[in-house]
């Protein structure tokens, strides 16, 4: 819906993701193969005049409804936009990527260390003919890999920022799809439990690390993440590294623990369309067997590692329950039937160091994930 002059506009979008998840080996007792509704998100977004933009996205998948995005933009200039509300913190490369555009069913291991959505205010923009994008903000703060809670329970704040360069973005050259940058955050956290200390999951969404219940987040928490991507015709490569440092304490003993992760994802579109950070946006021949159209096909491979600080054991984490390292790889096939419909098939395998009785290695986690995605 748009006004005659185009200053006022309301757009309605939607994202629906239905998964099938089947574990072949390594799943703990009580983990069942299942079909599930992973995402059910209607979105209302638009403009209220030339200066104000907005977005509101609830989530209806899961046991209860929640709000994913709820923010307003004050668009002073392409180089200076002020965003206020709940949105993704500007740190992780894959965290900032739309769920609809992911190369695999679930995000890679570095996203377990990056903050997800937080509540705050952010200054953002693009300069140098859109070759440089930046964002810097102040937020309530959230644990690694998760959304912020609805309030600020420890009365502390987190500062986050990111700068990303695409130096050849406007050039018709082989390097036009190159982008690289750095995201970071810093703040204090004070408290215990899931609102203050993280639990890390494999790409199969099974927890492999958690702190002991008596451990406190007790001081400075910082993250640092160099990142980049390269796209050329049907080829895509995305990589990032992140380290998360958190001061913790238990029974009068304090330490700063550093957990780190990295990943690389390569993709290739078999049917000739261009790869991009937004995925394959439009197949050149949408699915229509009667006219020879079969959509677009994309092969994907990913490898990633997440390592826990050795000093976490045995005081801050139980070596008989929490693994020291997760090493994961995924291969997949994406089928874009048209601009709105996507089918995904992934095989995931994760090796874990430790985490079993007497500190033995847990069994390798092997799974097949499928997804049907409708986006408009």
Image: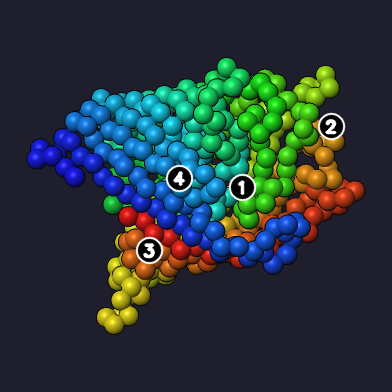
**Residue at the disc numbered 2:** 315
Q: CA distance from mark 4 to mark 1?
A: 23 Å
| Eye-nearest disc, 2 or 4 | 4
Q: Are marks 1 and 3 in contact (CB under 8 Å)?
A: no
- Check residue 109 in the rendering and tell me which mark sits there, or answer none: 1
Q: CA distance from mark 2 to mark 4?
A: 38 Å
| Above or below, 90 relative to 369 | above
Q: Residues within 10 Å of mark 4 (few under 14, many from 20)?
A: some
Q: From this viewpoint, is residue 355 visible?
A: yes
**Residue at the disc numbered 4:** 59
Point out residue 221 in the picture as x, y percentages from the top left corner: 63, 25
- Check residue 341 in the rendering and tell me which mark sits there, or answer none: 3
Q: Residues within 10 Å of mark 2 (few under 14, many from 20)?
A: some
| Eye-nearest disc, 1 or 2 | 2
**Relative to residue 301, is residue 230 drawn left or right?**
left
Residue at x-position 33% and y-position 66%: 338
């Amino acid at each position: 819906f748009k006004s005659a002059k185009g200053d006022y506009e309301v757009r309605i979008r939607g994202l629906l993701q239905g998964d099938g998840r089947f574990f072949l080996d390594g799943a703990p007792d009580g983990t069942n193969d299942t079909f599930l509704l992973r995402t059910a998100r209607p979105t209302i977004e638009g403009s209220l005049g030339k200066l104000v933009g907005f977005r509101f996205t609830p989530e209806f998948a899961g046991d209860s409804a929640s709000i994913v995005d709820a923010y307003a933009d004050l668009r002073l200039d392409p180089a200076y936009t002020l965003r206020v509300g709940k949105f993704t913190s500007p740190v992780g490369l894959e965290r900032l990527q739309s769920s609809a555009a992911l190369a695999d069913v679930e995000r890679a291991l570095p996203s377990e260390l990056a903050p997800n959505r937080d509540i705050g205010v952010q200054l953002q923009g693009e300069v140098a003919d859109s070759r440089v994008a930046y964002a810097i903000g102040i937020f309530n703060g959230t644990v690694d890999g998760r959304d912020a809670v609805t309030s600020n329970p420890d009365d502390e704040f987190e500062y986050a920022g990111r700068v990303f360069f695409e130096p050849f973005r406007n050039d018709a050259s082989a390097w036009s799809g190159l982008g690289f940058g750095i995201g970071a955050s810093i703040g204090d956290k004070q408290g215990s439990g899931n609102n203050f200390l993280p639990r890390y999951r494999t790409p199969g969404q099974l927890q492999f690390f958690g702190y002991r219940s008596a451990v406190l987040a007790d001081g400075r928490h910082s993250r640092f993440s160099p990142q980049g991507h390269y796209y050329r015709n049907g080829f895509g490569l995305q990589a990032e590294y992140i380290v998360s440092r958190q001061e913790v304490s238990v029974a009068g003993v304090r330490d700063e623990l550093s957990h780190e992760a990295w990943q690389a994802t390569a993709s290739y579109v078999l049917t000739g369309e261009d790869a991009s950070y937004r995925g394959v946006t439009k197949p050149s021949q949408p699915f229509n067997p009667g006219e020879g159209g079969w959509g677009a096909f994309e092969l994907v491979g990913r490898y990633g590692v997440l390592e826990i600080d050795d000093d976490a054991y045995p005081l801050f984490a139980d070596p008989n329950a929490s693994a020291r390292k997760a090493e994961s790889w995924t291969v997949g096939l994406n089928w874009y039937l048209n601009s709105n419909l996507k089918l995904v098939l992934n095989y995931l395998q994760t090796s874990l160091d430790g985490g079993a009785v007497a500190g033995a290695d847990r069994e390798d986690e092997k799974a097949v994930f499928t997804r049907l995605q409708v986006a408009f």
